[in-house]
Image (spheres, helix red, strand yellow):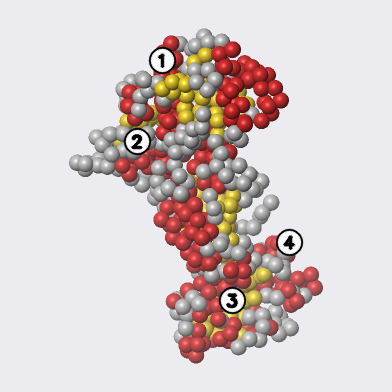
Amino acid sequence: MDTVPVPKAVGEMRAGDHLLLGYGADEERETVVATFLLDGLASGHRGLLLGPADLPADLALTFLESRGCAVDDELAAGRLTVDPHLATSDGLWDLDEVIRRETRRAVGDGYLGLRVSMEVMRGQAGKGLKTLHDSELLLEPVFASLPVLGICQYDRRVFDEGELAPLDGLHQGRVAADLVWHDELLSITRTFAPPGLALAGEVDDTNVTALARALHAETDRARARPVNGMRTRIDLHDLRFIDVGALRLLVFAGGALAASGGTLVLHGVAPHIQRLMRVTGWDRVPGLLVEQTHL
Amino acid sequence: MSRTRLVHQALCYGSDDEFLDGTLTFVRDGLDAGDTVLAVVASHNIGLLGEALGHRSDEVEFVDADDWYGSPSRTLGRYNDYCAAHDTDETGRRRRVRVIGEPVWSDRTAFEVREWMRYESLLNIAFAGTGHWILCPYDTRALPVGIIRSAVRTHPELALGPRQSAYCGRYLDPADFYAECDTTRPPVLPAGRDDVPFTRGRSAHVRRAVSAYARALGVPEPLTHDMVSAVHEAVVNSVRHGGGRGVLRLRSDSDHVICEISDTGTATASPPPPPPFPGHLPPDPRAANGHGMWVVRQLSDLATETLDPSGSVVRLYFRRSAAL
């Protein structure tokens, strides 16, 4: 049973938020952290990256370049900073002190707040994660009293859910990438491992364009990702209704992907939607693969 | 006799011998030619034909007609799927599908009988582009004379024993037969207190109304999903082609749930004409449109439609104890 709480979208974060990001793919981490830092620049905040390695600052921030950020300019102006503090063996010990000091310094430099993104390494966690827990525990009062927002990144390929669950209680919850679309009927989210989209709710004539846009962007990304054989997975597990017009869009997206050697994988298709696909013959068109799942 | 275009024949038989005379050679010729042979006939006739064929009966796929002929549109969809799956051999070469299709006419209402006659006529269009051969037995001992008479109007040919046939002089063009079927149509449902008006962008509201109605009737969940989808597609069609607004009426009796979707029509002087045989012909999966009405018919047990620029009415019938 999946007991992970509903995450907060990174775009909804406010001062005082101290959230946990459990990511399963580098693209997920980069997407969330980039949004977090770029939102910070737009909000008059300073962005601070506490990385796990002692990398040159511009190298540590290359993932922002592709998202339209002039990294060198921001670093030179001091709006973005990179600190290798966590790369040291005892970087976790005085983490709260570092963030308290950096927040005060940012405010002193005229910023409206500080956004700090931290990557926690497995090796630093200490015996039975004790060091890590103590460190996270000390952070909470800092976030409660100063104009600072933070994301603690944990690689789910390194930390398992059993290790992350107790850490949830030391944060105000989890953070995830922004929703691609949200209206009263439908929400579309990006998934990263495997890459694709998750649809929840209902797609009909009113929001089919939102689906078209999301699919288009996603198939573009798939084409830029040759390592995976351009498989894009659409998770329909929480989709209650889809009409013929929207289903046809999935068929067209699958066909477009197939033309460049890819596949659109439909995951978690409910029996009544599978029936719709059988009736239209869309269960056997090129480029579309209905993944058999236990529902 | 080597024929390459669609052949659709009625076989009127009055005895077991006449049935075998008309079907046995048909099957053997097909097997000899490497055709796929499917026999969907009354259970008694499965026994007859199977025995007469002997060991070759293994090469024929037999289906009891009672298990196959659920509703006209679904049956057409089923034959379409079957032929699509069997019209090539292992090497990918085209092969003919021979079907012996004996519709079930007993225990049908007058309305259902008419829709099955329409179905027989529509087969000529649905499979027009194929080289398949459909032979439809009519049991003259059991069937009312009106049904027998309709056979020569819906089949271009009458089969007369082994390898013998005659053109039906009274065969009617399917478009004309379709129009004739439409002349008797149930009257529009009267307005009711629970009518669900709809406008552009309000299909979710209609879907809620349909599922609430089904829930209150205790309709099983799979059937509720079918009703919601079929009504939704009809509503979206109404909004797109019928002036952007209309009303849904939900009724039920002991046998059926009835959903009627009507609209007020378009204001334009010369709207495009509605497609011929709307939703009856299997659409190409790659086509940009034409799937909506097909889905409406495939998900409902019976559907009638009056598509008119001054206001259209689509009525859907769902059997409450859906057998198929």
Q: Residue at x 52, y 56 (%)?
A: A254
Q: Is residue B273 left or right of residue A152?
A: left
**Residue B258: x %, y % from top left:** 42, 27
- Amino acid type of the residue tagged 1 in the rendering: Arg
Quarter of the image for residue B31 reads: top right
- Pointers 1 and 3 within a single chain: no
Res A258 seen here: yes
Chain of residue at mark 1 = B
Where A249 sits versus A270, above or below? Answer: below
Q: Which residue is mark 2?
A: B276
Look at the numbered disc 4 and give the secondary structure of its residue.
helix
Q: Which residue is mark 4?
A: A162
Res B227 seen here: no
Look at the numbered disc 1 and give the secondary structure of its residue.
helix
Look at the numbered disc 3 and give the secondary structure of its residue.
strand
- How far is mark 2 from mark 1, CA to CA? 25 Å
Using the image, tell me which numbered label, if any, was put on residue A117. 3
Nearest to viewer (mark 2 / mark 3): 2
Nearest to viewer (mark 2 / mark 1): 1
Which residue is outermost to the front?
B1
- How far is mark 2 from mark 3, CA to CA? 62 Å
Q: Residue at x 52, y 14 (%)?
A: B13
